[in-house]
Amino acid sequence: MNVTQDMSVWGLVANASLFVQLVMLGLLLASLLSWWYIFRKVFVLRQAKADTESFEKTFWSGGDLNGLYQAAVAAKHRSGSLERIFEAGFREFSKLKRQGAGGAPFDRAAAIDGTRRAMSATYQREMDALEDHLAFLASVGSVTPYVGLLGTVWGIMHAFMGLSTVAQATLSLVAPGIAEALIATAMGLFAAIPAVLAYNRFSYDIDRLAVRFESFIEEFSNILQRQG
């Protein structure tokens, strides 16, 4: 009965050496934090895609650009990334156009270039926000297996060092120590696999959004170029 209890997962963790326990604790914290970021990113990207589709539908429905801009300004804290990109570009173009109406010569090419730069700056800020915490997921996915392996190597080394004090080494003596050490590797993989899968999926979704944002910047610039 004692053997069964000692060979349970919790028993093995409790009987592991202090270093291996610290490794397991670090892996557990990394796993919990990565799952927190994964759930947050799922909702953020889902909302970003919904906002992008909604604004694209409104924009290409042929509505008035001034009306779209006023709506974007009024809903500044609730607008999506694409709507903020449009707002930045239209605001810059309107400012440059008012300067031309005030007596200064209106350079359409310079106005379009300035508008594109304003949208590109907002685009970069939006992409930075969407990519937030992706580096952490990548780090968890690449580092935690090696951290778990470090705990395993240390645990196995500790188990074999303990055999030096016994007259006859048997499998029943070394098995608990090896099992304790292998839990660290399992925990490392448990932390790494979801982080890698989530990172790859999120990167794909963000890249798709980036393509849509960049296409909108070019298309909106062409619209302003035609309308003047």
Image (cartoon, helix red, strand yellow):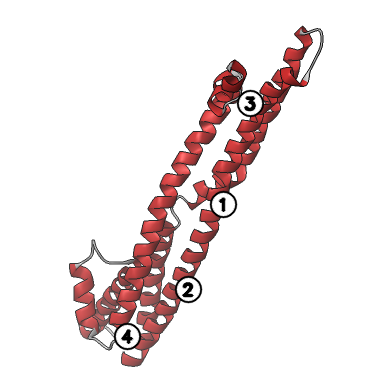
Query: Local crowd at mark 4 within 10 Å, few (<14), some, or many (≥20)?
Result: few
Read off the residue under disc 4. Answer: 60
Image height check: is 212 above or below 226? Answer: above
Read off the residue under disc 2. Answer: 211
Report helix, strand or loop for mark 4. Answer: loop
Where is the C terminus found, in terms of image quarters? Answer: bottom left
Q: Label 1, label 4: how many angstroms apart (C-alpha)?
A: 37 Å
Q: Earlier in the sequence, mark 2 or mark 3?
A: 3
Q: Residue at x 37, y 58 (%)?
A: 44
Residue 56 placement (x, y as % from top left): 34, 79
Image height check: is 144 above or below 200? Answer: above
Q: Is residue 121 left or right of residue 22?
A: left
Residue type marked 1: Val
Q: Residue at x 69, y 26 (%)?
A: 178
Q: Earlier in the sequence, mark 4 or mark 2?
A: 4
Q: Earlier in the sequence, mark 1 or mark 3?
A: 3
Read off the residue under disc 1. Answer: 196
Q: Earlier in the sequence, mark 3 or mark 4?
A: 4
Residue type marked 4: Trp
Report helix, strand or loop for mark 2. Answer: helix
Q: Nearer the viewer, mark 1 or mark 2?
A: 1
Q: Residue at x 41, y 59 (%)?
A: 130
Q: Residue at x 73, y 17 (%)?
A: 173
Residue type marked 2: Val
Q: Earlier in the sequence, mark 1 or mark 4?
A: 4
